[in-house]
Image: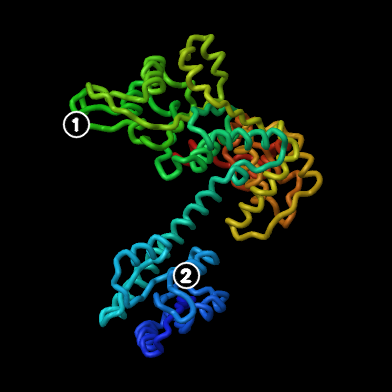
Amino acid sequence: MEQFRIFIVEDDVIYSEILKYHLSLSPDFLVDCFSTGTQCLNNLHKKPSLITIDFSLPDMSGKELLGKIRKITEETGIIIVSGQEDITTAVDLLKDGAFDYIVKNQDAPGRLWNSIRLFMENNALREENEKLKVEIGKKYDFSNLIIGCSRGINETFSMMEKAANSQVTVSITGETGTGKELVAKSIHYHSSRKKNQFIAVNIGAIPKDLMESELFGYEKGAFTGAFARKTGLFEDAHNGTIFLDEIAEMDLSVQTKFLRVLQEREIKRIGGNQTIKIDVRIITATHKNLAEEVKKGNFRSDLFYRIMGLPIHLIPLRERGYDIMILARHFADLFCKENHRQKMAFTEEAKKKLMSYSYPGNVRELKAAIELAIILSNDRKIDAQNINFITVESGDDLIKEEMTLDEHILKIRHPRLPQTKPRLFHKSILNL
């Protein structure tokens, strides 16, 4: 572990040695002593973590030295060790950026030790917080989530940045597999709400009779089985962001209450009379055409206009040009790294096959195809025969037919090859 470097700036040689002796008892501390402020400034290139300063120095006051150090660095901790007990002086120095002010007496070495330890703890917490912020930023960085450089993707980045810098309701549209939830998360973690909850809700996965209680909560005794109060997802997302995926699947009766949430920013639990104010950022998503759903009577027109806010459309993968190969290389490198395999290259035939496919499952389908290709490849190259897109129809055939693993792979590689191997066993025989 790197040692914690401390400068002691003290013109009293004996007192300086006393402080150095006490601090050097810790093997973690590396201590240097200086008798003037000028000597201290000339050695700042050593990057001390903390400096103790005597208020009265031969060439300048402790206040002057503090000011000069602060012009060079804001990170170094500074503790004033002074014979003066003037409270006003101490307060002024603390306002100027000193971490602590210690009066020279018999308790000073012990107080200094404790003050340095406190500074180290605060510094460690600050560094940890900064590291967490950086990691969160990297994880949900726009370019990490949506990889590519096509014009459509750059336009998406621009809209995401506008969304992150505002509190407007956001509506995300796009085909299944284009990454709508990842976009919603990225917007949240780049917004002013990033320290609070992000709650993702798949509306299509909630049974209609449970949707209202899930979203708005309920009071004890509101219905049979309500043995205790339960807060809803809107209430849980207070001060944060709620992402409502597949919003087109919301039941019409619940849409009315959701509209009130958007208009009044308040909810009522089922069975309750209390109005609960909420402050929540709402992001919705759907793969359906909401305007068409309004025409069909499946979605309220007033709710449609309220949730549109800032629209972000994620273009399908087939319209992203060479982004297909950029993503393919990314997924291949990622899969190889996770499975401790050497990186693989795509042959020209493989590239042509990847670029010519329509990708009904979008990025999700491409990722699955690349992972399968790496498994099927026998060397460090991914060839066209290794790339297979398992459609709903082909997947259904593979499930129905009773084949060994080798036969499955043969079926994937050569789907038109006639099956000549005789069937020796059948499920009915195995059940005997």
Q: Residue at left 51%, top 36%?
A: 184
Q: Nearer the viewer, residue 36 or 17?
A: 36
Q: Earlier in the sequence, mark 2 or mark 1?
A: 2
Is residue 410 visible from the viewing direction of this image? Answer: yes
Q: Is the residue under label 1 in contact with that under label 2 (CB below 8 Å)? A: no
Quarter of the C terminus within the rendering: top left
Residue at the extreme bottom of the image, as rendered: 14
Q: Nearer the viewer, residue 21 or 245?
A: 21
From the viewer's perspective, is residue 64 above or below residue 363?
Answer: below
In the picture, measured across the screen, residue 6 lies left or right of residue 89, that is right
Q: Residue at left 70%, top 52%?
A: 377
Residue where numbered disc 1 is placed = 227
Q: Residue at left 38%, top 16%?
A: 256
Q: Nearer the viewer, residue 367 or 252?
A: 252
From the viewer's perspective, is residue 388 above or below residue 47?
Answer: above
Q: How far across and down, in percent of the image, does residue 331 sit?
A: 64, 48
In the picture, measured across the screen, residue 348 lies left or right of residue 425, that is right
Q: Nearer the viewer, residue 142 or 98?
A: 98
Q: How far across and down, in percent of the image, does residue 286 sit?
A: 53, 25
